[in-house]
Amino acid sequence: MEIQSSRKIARKVTEYNGKDKRTLEVGQTNPKADRVTIGGIGERVGETARDLFLPQNYPNSVSKDYTATRAWWFARDVFSNAVGYCSGAAIGSALGIHPVWGGAGMASFNMIRDRTSQTVGFASSFLTPTADKNPRPWIVTGELLESAGMTLETAAASYSDQLLPIALSASVIRVVAGAMKGAGRANIGPRQAISDNLGEVGAKNGNQGFVASLLGAGIGMAAHSALSSAIGTGPASTLIAAVGSVGAIFSTSMMVNSLNMNPVNETAIDRLAESLDNNGEVVKPFS
């Protein structure tokens, strides 16, 4: 059988199938070529998506726990961004109710909140050495606090007179949560990038997070719009934040359960190996 790569056959082609034969007329569509073309497009789209969101030579270029941890963290990001949209909507609603926070007042509000957060950030940095040694409970606790902080912010829509104390309290909680989670997650990336590809893994994780943020914000926006007309802005924001927080906390707990990471044991093994190499002796525990 004579085969041409184009969809349209430029001349008559005779196909033989056992005893039968048929002729394709000039200009007739070759269905087999159509299937190849569509399949090729799908394959190229799949390859492009893979290049955008996964490291090269995946899964051999990352640790075995990479897929599970990233899947759960993607879900966590979706929930968290839905909550974040509602907390932002609540703060915006409260700011709109009180003209004092408009114009220059907005700058004062942001300055007070940011400086308070930075001050707390200095103090919370003392948590990082402990969190780095035992990351799982610190990551989950940090997620609990962050969800609590964002849910607290949604109360601003219902209690707009208390906007400043609510916003400051929520910011303080979220800063502490960020320090705990950041310290706990700091070593995950280097451990999962097993092919000297930490930069690429970080970039691909960022692409995954971008998609999750779009999904989460879209879900939060749609849910907030639907519920606000029924129960009001404040209750809608708080309800969505509560549900989203549960989802974020659950996803985070599943993520840490998927981690193959034991820093304390690994440190002890490193110390033992170093002592054997240097001195030929086994060091005492905690010496």
Image: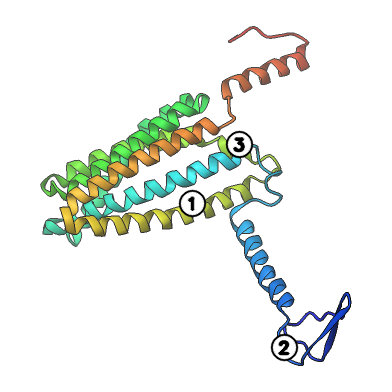
Placement of the C terminus among the 4 image quadrants:
top right
Query: Residue at (42%, 56%) from the top-left corner?
Result: 215
- What x and y, as percent, mark residue 273? 72, 18
Residue most extreme to the top: 284
Amino acid type at circle 1 is Gly
- What x and y, as percent, mark residue 24? 78, 87
Residue position marked by numbered label 1 in the rendering: 209
Q: Bin the neighbour count of mark 1 within 10 Å (Cα to Cα): few under 14, some 14-19, many 20 and up.
A: many
Classify residue 181 by image quadrant.
Answer: top left
Left or right: 101 with respect to 16? left
**SS at mark 2 in the image:** loop
**Could you tell me if residue 210 is visible in this image?**
yes
Classify residue 170 by image quadrant.
Answer: top left
- Are discs 2 and 1 less than 8 Å apart at CB? no
Residue 157 versus residue 9 in the image, above or below: above
- Are discs 3 and 2 less than 8 Å apart at CB? no
